[in-house]
Amino acid sequence: MADALDGNRSILVVGSGMSGLSTALEAAEAGFQVYIVEKEPYLGGRVARMNKYFPKLCPPSCGLEINFRRIKNNPLIRFFTMARVEKIQGEAGNFSVTVALQPRYVNEKCTGCGLCASAASTEIPDAFNYGLTTVKAAYLPHEFAFPFRYVVAPEVMGTGEAAAIKAACPYDAVDLDMKPHQFDLKVGSVVWATGWEPYDAGKIPYYGFGRNRNVITNVMMERLASANGPTSGKISRLSDGGEVKRVAFVQCAGSRDENHLPYCSGICCLASLKQATYVLEQDPEAQVTMFYIDIRALGKYEDFFTRVQSSDRLTLTKGKAGEITEDPQTGMVTVQVEDQSTGRILKEQFDLVVLATGMVPGTAAEKIPVQAAYDDHGFVLADQPVPGIVGAGCVRKPVDVSASVQDATAAALKAIQATCRR
């Protein structure tokens, strides 16, 4: 690869979640060269880890597969995984961007046969499953990964195990000599679409996340319900793999709280209603309780709320959950909450408690490496001090998938306009 990929009539998209993919495809199909930079070893972002979308309750894999096929068939799109943008210099129509690429230790010859994984013995946390499971040190990020190519973990570099992994590959696809390196891109505009992170539930001590074995977060619940997840889609207790008959969803876990996230993420209620359907469909005897402050299901989503809450096995209790404790012997989890409708203090036991944590923009922790403007919570503002730098999707505000796609279309247009400004 050349040190610089020239052409000011080009657009850099940072992040390959739904916003990034949609921006890239819109711009490329309008005739612009597009480069995608993604820090993970696969495209698809957080959406790739989801089980279903609301309100249709359909899997994201079909939509992602269509987008990946569009990328494969479009010569104007190039993407770089395991990559980060280190520096941005210049102006709209003429940016110079430095990208740092981490070694995958597996090249384009990989066929996805899995022989390298068979030769590995070291286990590392599986980031795709939020650490709920482990994977071998030679691993495929997930079964629908794009690109469909294995990764060798840096933890085994320089060991006999790494040599065995290389020897197991009959296609000479394992390259242990790969090194980190940098390269430059010349682009006309930059779209920052690095998505969101779930709020760290460990910062809420009275909920006991990380201490209570059967208290999980909403993103973890999505993986438990997924057929390609750690339990093959069977929602069960983490403590012993036991059945879940009673599940609680604790809304606003850290959200609308000046000590944590003072804002509402807007989609957590809908996500919990969606996940309630997972539990109710899995077991006809299961019961679900949602502890909430307010249910946010506006506009087109009101019908979805009405449909889900009509189940006689779903109880909605208005009240912000207080302390959550777990019995070390039985694994049963007790949620204490004041029922706002009656004034009574409730203490109810559940097999599993799901914390509906809010959305934190990726830019709260990892800023755009150029002068940029953010609000008090780290969300990217619409008006930027450097023209040609455009935010898209959840780095601008908490939104659902369909709104992310809409925002990506707007971002693509803004990027095209900035690129053509010269």
Image (spheres, rainbow, N blue to C red):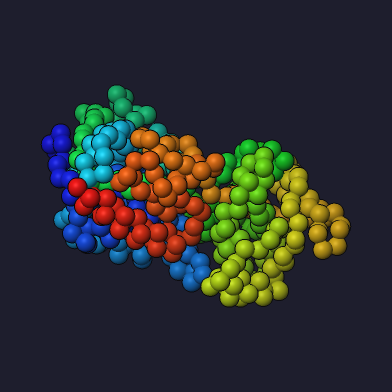
Where residue 167 appears, as percent x and y from the top left, is 22, 35
Where residue 198 appears, as percent x and y from the top left, is 53, 46
Nearer to the camera, 118 or 339 = 339
Question: Farthest residue toward the top?
Answer: 158
Q: Is residue 239 left or right of residue 371?
A: right
Residue 246, picture quadrant: bottom right
Q: Is residue 406 left or right of residue 214?
A: left
Where residue 253 appears, as percent x and y from the top left, is 65, 49
Where residue 338 appears, as percent x and y from the top left, is 81, 54
**In the rendered image, the vertical position of residue 60 relative to residue 328, given as above or below:** below
Work out which quarter of the rendered image holds the N terminus and state it. top left
Residue 261 appears anywhere in the view: yes
Which residue sits at x=57%, y=58%?
266
Which residue sits at x=24%, y=31%?
182
**In the rendered image, the vertical position of residue 393 relative to residue 105, given as above or below:** below
Residue 62, picture quadrant: bottom left
Nearer to the camera, 410 or 330 = 410
Which residue sits at x=46%, y=50%?
396
**In the rendered image, the vertical position of residue 166 relative to residue 257, given as above or below:** above
Residue 44 appears anywhere in the view: no
Nearer to the camera, 309 or 231 = 309
Which residue sits at x=51%, y=70%?
55
